[in-house]
Image (cartoon, rainbow, N blue to C red):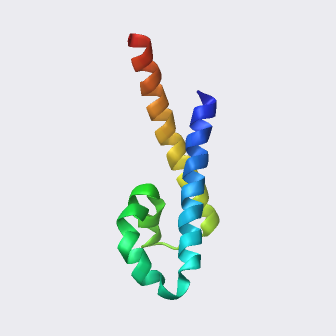
């Protein structure tokens, strides 16, 4: 179970990194491109919503997203384990 939760955290880290690279790669037209995909950013990287109101560094966003995904993974894997044992 620890490995699966770790994989959830790594997925969150990689998703935040992907969005950071996307923003860097499309920098001159970032506002136009991000406006088109902002819904996806908010769903996959919830710390981005807080980043609209407060300055958040890249490292903080990566860590926060990894922690968020790790906690979601903990909940999902716990529920999955309980449902598996009931059957």
For image coordinates 53% across by 75% down, the residue present is: 23
**Residue farthest to the bottom, as pictured:** 28
Residue 63 coordinates in the image, percent (x, y) = 60, 55
Residue 8 coordinates in the image, percent (x, y) = 55, 42
From the image, which quarter does the N terminus lie in? top right
For image coordinates 52% across by 74% down, the residue present is: 55
77 displayed left or right of 4: left
In the figure, 26 relative to 39: above or below?
Answer: below
Res 56 visible = no
The one nearer the camera, 49 or 27, is: 27
Quarter of the image for residue 15 reads bottom right
In the figure, 3 relative to 57: above or below?
Answer: above
Res 49 visible = yes
Total marks in image: 0
From the image, which quarter does the C terminus lie in? top left
Quarter of the image for residue 76 reads top left
For image coordinates 54% across by 71% down, the residue present is: 22
In the figure, 2 relative to 15: above or below?
Answer: above
The one nearer the camera, 82 or 26, is: 26
């Amino acid at each position: 179970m620890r490995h699966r939760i770790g994989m959830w955290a790594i997925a969150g880290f990689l998703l935040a990194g992907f969005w950071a690279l996307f923003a860097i790669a499309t920098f001159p037209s970032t506002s136009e491109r991000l406006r088109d995909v902002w819904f996806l950013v908010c769903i996959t990287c919830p710390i981005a919503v807080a980043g609209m109101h407060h300055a958040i560094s890249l490292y903080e966003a990566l860590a926060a997203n990894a922690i968020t995904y790790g906690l979601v993974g903990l909940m999902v894997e716990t529920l999955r384990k309980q449902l598996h044992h009931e059957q």
